Amino acid sequence: MGFKTGIQPIDEQIPDGIPAGYVVLIEGYLGVGKTFFASTMAATAANAGAPVLFFSIDAMADEVVEEMQRGGASAERLVVVDGFAAPSERYSKLKPPTRHRLETPDAFALMNKLVEFANEFRGGVVVVDSLNEVVMRSPGSALDLFRAFKIFARSTDSVVVATAHTDVEEVYGVMATAEHLADVILQIEVDPNLEEMGLYVRRMRIARARRLKVAHDWIHFEIVNGRVVEVDVRTMLKMLSKQLRELGIEMRQVR
């Protein structure tokens, strides 16, 4: 049995779970829920008794711990590596002290920190949120970084989950050269057709799943009370269209 993500649409498509040794890439524009997905996966692993190693690069380490604890995860199963770089030494003194930290949030430091945990970390989940600053600081190391993820995942029987904000042009270009090394690619976005109608509805799909049989169709969803809930867009649009007709307004069909 593989790793359950705690995200219903994914676990339904991959009922046996994500195999140990896999690298998962969650990509999409800013604000679509990538961090929530990654944190949910980490909390699910911790709740199941697996160790979690969380590289906090886009948020302060104490915020990650608080978010994980809100998800019910035990702090005993969680190690947070602080990669949130302070702009100066003076500001770094204002941050809460952490046991583990990245001196600089670049690919070299991240790979070295993974090596430090390689001997003691087994059967868990590693989260890197996000890769943006890492690849922007060291754009030529994306391939090496993903190779390091694969080696670490295989050698520790773990799953490595990384997020990337692909609305940043530089990051999108760098990630395109390395994403083929990811075993599972999860894409999240706002449905562009519905957005043209003024409706903010997110959708997700498993764009790649190595050696796994999955549907690659888009699934619309919303995050409700800390859970990912699938949205029936056709029913939603029918109800909206009926309400608009009652007001004398005809709704344009979605392409």
Image: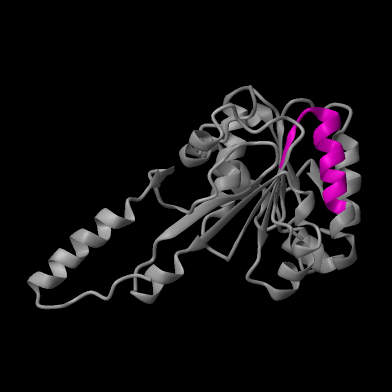
Q: Position of residue 167 (x, y in %)?
A: 63, 71
Q: Position of residue 215 (x, y in %)?
A: 53, 44
Residue 157 part of the magenta segment: yes
The magenta segment: 145-160
In which image quadrant can residue 244 be found?
A: bottom left
Which residue is at a point 58% across and 55% down the rendered structure image? 187
The quadrant the N terminus occupies is top right
Front in this rendered view, residue 109 or 98: 109
Placement of 250 over or under 139, stated as above or below: below
- Asked if one can make out residue 121 in the rendered structure from this viewpoint, the answer is no
Query: On the rendered structure, is 85 left or right of 155?
Result: left
Placement of 235 over or under 11, stated as above or below: below
Placement of 242 over or under 149, stated as above or below: below
Front in this rendered view, residue 108 or 153: 153
Main secondary structure of the magenta stretch: helix
The quadrant the C terminus occupies is bottom left
Query: On the rendered structure, is 35 left or right of 157?
Result: left
Query: On the rendered structure, is 7 left or right of 124?
Result: left
Q: Position of residue 11 (x, y in %)?
A: 52, 34
Query: On the rendered structure, is 133 left or right of 72?
Result: right
Front in this rendered view, residue 15 or 75: 15
Q: How is the image coloured?
A: one colour
- Asked if one can make out residue 81 in the rendered structure from this viewpoint, the answer is yes
Residue 177 part of the magenta segment: no
Which residue is at a point 78% across and 28% down the rendered structure image? 157
Q: Position of residue 75 (x, y in %)?
A: 63, 31
